[in-house]
């Protein structure tokens, strides 16, 4: 059967009652004024060079480099994450956009000689014994794109190192990923060691091996089915939500 290329990746927008491509839906959300419009489009398309070029023009016109992060880059990335949450685009698109947005942040930091104030600090790691770090890498990228400082401990991180990092960094949240069922039990040990130390930091857990039934067996655990849940959880913590409220929101059954 021959497919008409023009019909591929067309979605029906129920609110608008018309078929739209992801690109058309994104375009409706772009700011009207330049350079924000062009930069938002470049972020959506994952074009790092175009993002930086747009920022160069804005700075040359007198814009404050650090203000561009909050006023242009973050809203541009929000368009991407909103469309992802609606199921319009997929995780690879989000990752490309996050990379483009982070390239823009680096440019702005270099131009200003300073860094924006992060929303909060989060420690990320892959469970001890597990070398599969793609999930953790995605989580860290999405958190950075959302404006959080990430302390990335890497993969196959011993429990002792996780506890030491939490004590040293005092993060607002800890994340852990595991792809192998034999390694996810390290999360329970991390939980118990943190409680012994009197630390009650929300512990977002996910990955191919992890499910909600396992995570609910330990006090600090909050199950994140999708990588995008990590910045959502962080935003809720920032808004003053409790560990109990996080569980109520993210635990589906």
Image (cartoon, rainbow, N blue to C red):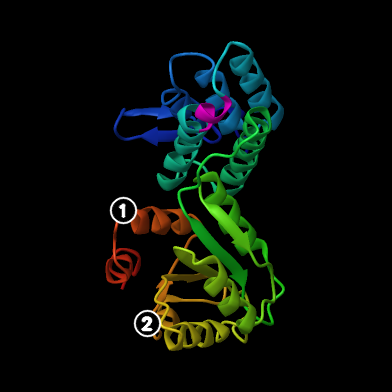
Horizontal and vertical percent position of residue 28: 42, 23
Q: Quadrant of residue 106?
A: top right
- Label 2 to label 1: alpha-carbon separation: 21 Å
Horizontal and vertical percent position of residue 252: 33, 68
Whether residue 66 is in magenta: the answer is yes
The residue positioned farthest toward the top in the image shown: 61
Q: Main secondary structure of the magenta part?
A: helix
User: In the picture, which quadrant includes the N terminus?
Assistant: top right
Provide the residue designation for mark 1. Answer: 239
Any part of residue 97 in sight: yes
Which mark is nearer the camera, 2 or 1? 1
- The image shows residue 57, relative to residue 132, as above or below, that is above
Of residues 2 and 108, the one drawn nearer to the viewer in this rendering: 108
Q: Residue at x 36, y 54 (%)?
A: 238
Horizontal and vertical percent position of residue 213: 40, 81
Numbered disc 1: secondary structure:
loop
Answer left or right for 182 relative to 83: right
Provide the residue designation for mark 2. Answer: 219
User: In the picture, which quadrant includes the C terminus?
Assistant: bottom left
- What residue span does the magenta drawing correspond to? 65-69
Say which mark, if any, is on residue 250. none
Whether residue 164 is in magenta: the answer is no
Horizontal and vertical percent position of residue 29: 42, 26
Q: Residue at x 40, y 59 (%)?
A: 233
């Amino acid at each position: 059967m021959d497919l008409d290329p023009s019909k591929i990746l067309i979605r029906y927008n129920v609110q608008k009652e018309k078929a739209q491509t992801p690109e058309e839906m994104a375009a409706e959300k772009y700011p009207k004024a330049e350079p924000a419009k062009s930069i938002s489009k470049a972020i959506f398309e994952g074009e790092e060079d175009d993002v930086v070029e747009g920022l160069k023009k804005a700075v040359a016109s007198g814009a404050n480099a650090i203000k561009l992060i909050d006023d242009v880059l973050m809203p541009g990335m929000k368009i991407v994450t909103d469309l992802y949450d609606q199921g319009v685009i997929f995780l690879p698109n989000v990752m490309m956009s996050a990379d483009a947005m982070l390239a823009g942040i680096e440019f702005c930091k270099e131009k200003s000689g300073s860094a924006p104030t992060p929303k909060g600090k989060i420690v990320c790691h892959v469970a001890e014994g597990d070398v599969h770090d793609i999930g953790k890498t995605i989580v860290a990228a999405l958190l950075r794109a959302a404006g959080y400082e990430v302390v990335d401990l890497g993969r196959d991180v011993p429990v002792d190192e996780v506890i030491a990092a939490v004590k040293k960094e005092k993060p607002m949240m800890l994340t852990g990923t595991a792809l192998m069922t034999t390694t996810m039990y390290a999360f329970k040990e991390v939980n118990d060691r943190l409680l012994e130390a009197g630390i009650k930091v929300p512990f977002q857990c996910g990955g191919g091996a992890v499910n909600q039934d396992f995570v609910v067996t330990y006090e600090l655990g909050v199950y994140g089915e999708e990588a995008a849940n990590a910045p959502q959880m962080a935003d809720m913590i920032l808004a003053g939500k409790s560990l109990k409220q996080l569980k109520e929101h993210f635990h589906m059954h």
